[in-house]
Amino acid sequence: MIDLEQIRRDVEACERGMNEEYYLNWSGQKDDLDTASVLDKCPSLGERETVDHISARRQIAEPEEERKLKYLHGVTVGFYLASLVKDLNDAKETEEAKLTIDVDGEEMAYRMSRVHMVNEDDRAKRHAIHDARIKASHGLNKILVERWGKLHNTAVDLGYNNYTMLYRNLKGINFTSLLNEIKEFKQRTDKLYREKMGEMTDSLGVSLEEAEKHDISHLLRAKQFDPHFKKGNSLPALKETLKGLGIDLDSQKNIIVDIEEREKKTPRAFCAPLDIPSKIMLVTMPQGGYSDYSSLFHEAGHAEHLGNVNPDEPMEFKYLGDNSVTESFAFTFDYLLTDRNWVNEFIKMPNVDEYIHHAFVEKLFFVRRYGSKLEYEMKLHTDGLPGMDQVYKSVMEDGMVFKHPRERYLLDLDDGFYCSQYLRAWIFHAQMIDLMKEKFGEKWFLNTKSGNYLTDLWSVGQKYDVVELAQNEGFQGLDIEPLTEEIIANLE
Ligand SMILES: [Zn+2]
């Protein structure tokens, strides 16, 4: 007999166990990443019966119960799929961790080679690393082809036409209408994008059409602004910003900042909720540079959101729900880095115009990139794997113009249409910032009332999806106009 309360307890234990595995591995305290054994501890979550049971319960549930069951259905399908491919996941991680590449006689770890590539000023050398990475990815692709074949087949076994329809149902997101909105955004920004990105690639002596993926990663790295984003200042800048909102990070005992330097710690900041809301890890190893700051602020947005959830909310609203919501709060902090008023207050740099311009080119780049990814993923997860390497290349090049190697078609991909949740978060965060400026002034981040407003929104976790959240705040729903206008206004 299946016990719903037991499933809820298992889901919470599994979520927390997974987050702890990632925390220990990424923070450099544990060598291997063993998510398989976390799944093994909750065998009910790897069973088809559990998924079917929740699916059936959804049919007869009252609206408030259905809200929780929908989130529970999503997570149990996720765990079920994960359990079917857990050996392939581990095989891919293991293969990737031991993979090395040879660049003109110099041996490099595959995982670190990306960092070397992005930082390399010499275009020929950068190209050599890029080439070696592509050649080395053959084995990874073999594993991923098998993995995606299994996931696609399972979606059909579960009674859906394909993986796209499975996630359309689980996430309740109409991918087609989202894609249509993004296509319009891309059309409206097309000329601007080509012009601004073309100006950047000019500095390398190539046109945007001729530029390679590694050129773009290198240009977006924007080393020229490094002197203004010093290694030791990122955490103090975050604390000062939070103070402006009336939030004292040092006295928030449930948000633990892990700033310790460890040899194997991943340099990119991340947030690991070990227990919501009582133990949230905000992990960083400051490197300095613009993107190092923005990733710390992004993750701090997640940490504040999860650390301020009312402990009495049900497990489903604390751990599950629509991640477009938490990503919106993360972007709200992340994109302070593109706010001229904030920069003048906290960074103070002489070439602020040049910097803001760069930051908005990057924002435009990312929204278009995720829009192109959504278009590609809909094709991949509807039509299946054969020929998709070419489709990846043509869809990405159509949207982004510069070259995309077809060999990246399964490596440049997240599970479960996560790209759609980033896109909804980009759309909503721009609406929310407009609203906060209207309510609390252009310098909303210096007003403790903004802090109270956000804390209030944070307290329900992810009870509401992002569309409901927008409606609760007086909008008709999601509206891409503020995002489009903001980008155009800052680049024209
Ligand atoms: Zn995020």
Image (cartoon, rainbow, N blue to C red):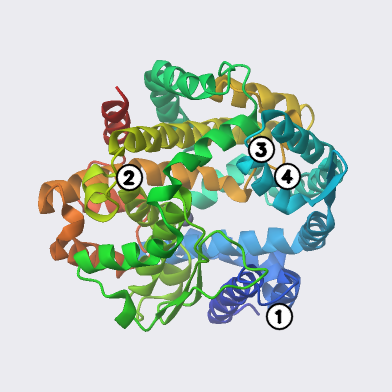
Residue 142 visible in the picture? yes
Question: Can residue 373 be seen from the camera position used here?
Answer: no
Could you tell which of marks 4 and 1 lies nearer the N-terminus?
A: 1
- Point out the frontmost of discs 4 and 2: 2
The amino acid on which the numbered mark 1 sits, given as a three-letter code, is Lys
- Residue 152, numbered circle: 4
**Quadrant in the rendering for residue 243:** bottom left
Q: Give the CA distance from mark 4 to mark 2.
A: 30 Å
Q: Residue at x 63, y 17 (%)?
A: 210
Residue assigned mark 1: 41
Q: Which residue is mark 3?
A: 381
Determine the residue positioned at 33% across, 79% down: 250
The percent coordinates of residue 442 (x first, y second) are 14, 47
Please state which amino acid type lies under the numbered disc 2.
Phe
N-term mark: 1 or 2: 1
First in residue order: circle 4 vs circle 2: 4
Q: Residue at x 40, y 43 (%)?
A: 424
